[in-house]
Amino acid sequence: QVQLVESGGGLVQAGGSLRLSCLASGRTFTGYRVAWFRQAPGKEREFVAAVMRSDSNTGYADSVKGRFTISRDNAKNTVNLQMDSLKPEDTAVYYCAASDRITIIPYSLGGAYDYWGQGTQVTVSS
């Protein structure tokens, strides 16, 4: 079993940047599909970005494409989410999710993941 811990959230002005990190403990992260999701108050959880387990291909929600970058740091057993040009609508709790199983469930859906972190708050002021 793997435990996920997010860090790096905070308060930033619109146009600023933040870098979130998801640290895995208990297992090596390299064999896992890892994603970031977010949930704003009163809204459903939504997919943000993912990095695949086999070849490190990435996928992004249209709303963050060109502004956010997901990447692996295998030496630190982390997956990072670099968030640039932040907007007030990016305000949410951001969750890291991971899975090592093969599935036909699209990587943008929460059902494709077995392990979740506790979340980190990101607040973007206008």
Image (cartoon, rainbow, N blue to C red):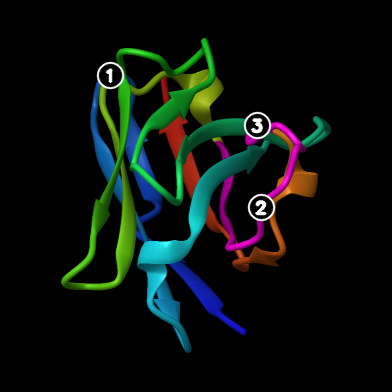
Q: Say how many tags the image has.
A: 3
Question: Left or right of 103: which side holds 73?
Answer: left
- Dot 2 amino acid type: Ile
- The residue carrying mark 3 is 108
Count residues near mark 1 (Cα–Cα under 10 Å), then give few for <14, some for 14-19, many for 20+. Answer: some
Question: Which label was assigned to residue 85?
Answer: 1
Quick one: SS at disc 3? loop
User: Residues under labels 2 and 3: Cα distance?
Assistant: 14 Å
Q: Which range is magenta?
A: 92-108
- The residue carrying mark 2 is 102
The residue mark sitting in front, 1 or 2, is: 2
> Does the magenta segment cover residue 123?
no
> Do the CB atoms of the residues marked 3 and 1 lie less than 8 Å apart?
no
Among numbered discs 2 and 3, the one appearing first in the sequence: 2
Q: Residue sitting at 48 percent across and 21 percent down?
A: 88
Up the image or down, 25 lies above or below 23; here it is: below
Count residues near mark 3 (Cα–Cα under 10 Å), then give few for <14, some for 14-19, many for 20+. Answer: some
Question: Left or right of 95: which side holds 87?
Answer: left
Q: Residue sitting at 72 percent across and 46 percent down?
A: 103
The residue mark sitting in front, 2 or 3, is: 2
